[in-house]
Image (cartoon, rainbow, N blue to C red):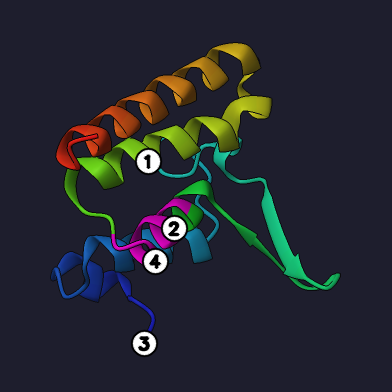
Amino acid sequence: MKPSTDNIKSNKFSHKDLDDFSRVTGANDEVNHPKHYQHIILGHNNKDFQKFEAVDILDGITDSLGLKGSEAGLLWNCLKYVLRAPYKGNEIQDFEKSSWYLSRLIDKLKKERNQ
């Protein structure tokens, strides 16, 4: 069922439902759907190509790895900066930010595992 305006106003849908609805209806603003996150096109064996936003990829990765809490957040941010680096105008800075989050994740995991 697609959210109708009445259902949205009555709060019968979650934030994700509303976000998905805004994607379907073509919302394209710099808060909900920044252009630098709308460039990922994935397919398999040169077919079945689909367009994804970075948030879709990042959620899928952290969920499939079973990461929770700060570990998920650190990996999420690390990958976010990699995915958007070519589209924001300062690749080196975004890769440095990604490296900072990855280093912090590695340090956290080592500490937890006593390495």
Neighbour class for label 2 at 10 Å: few (<14), some, many (≥20)? Answer: some
Magenta region, main secondary structure: helix
- Residue to which mark 2 is pinned: 61
Q: Residue at 56% across / 21% down in the picture?
A: 95
Q: Pointers 2 and 4 in contact (CB under 8 A)?
A: yes
Residue lying at the far front in this picture: please name it.
115
User: In terms of secondary structure, where does tag 2 sit?
Assistant: helix
- Of mark 3 and mark 1, the one earlier in the sequence is 3
Q: Count the marks: how many? A: 4
- Which amino acid, by three-letter code, is at mark 2? Ile
- Relative vertical location of residue 32 with respect to residue 59 in this rendering, above or below: above
Q: Pointers 1 and 2 in contact (CB under 8 A)?
A: yes
- Relative vertical location of residue 73 with respect to residue 66 in this rendering, above or below: above
Q: Pointers 4 and 1 in contact (CB under 8 A)?
A: no
Neighbour class for label 3 at 10 Å: few (<14), some, many (≥20)? Answer: few
Q: Residue at 54% across / 12% down in the picture?
A: 93
- Give the CA distance from mark 2 to mark 4: 5 Å
- Residue to which mark 3 is pinned: 1
- Residue to which mark 1 is pinned: 75
Q: Which residues are magenta?
A: 58-66
- Give the CA distance from mark 3 to mark 1: 33 Å
- Residue to which mark 4 is pinned: 64
* Residue 3 in picture, x, y percent from top left: 33, 76
User: In terms of secondary structure, where does tag 1 sit?
Assistant: helix
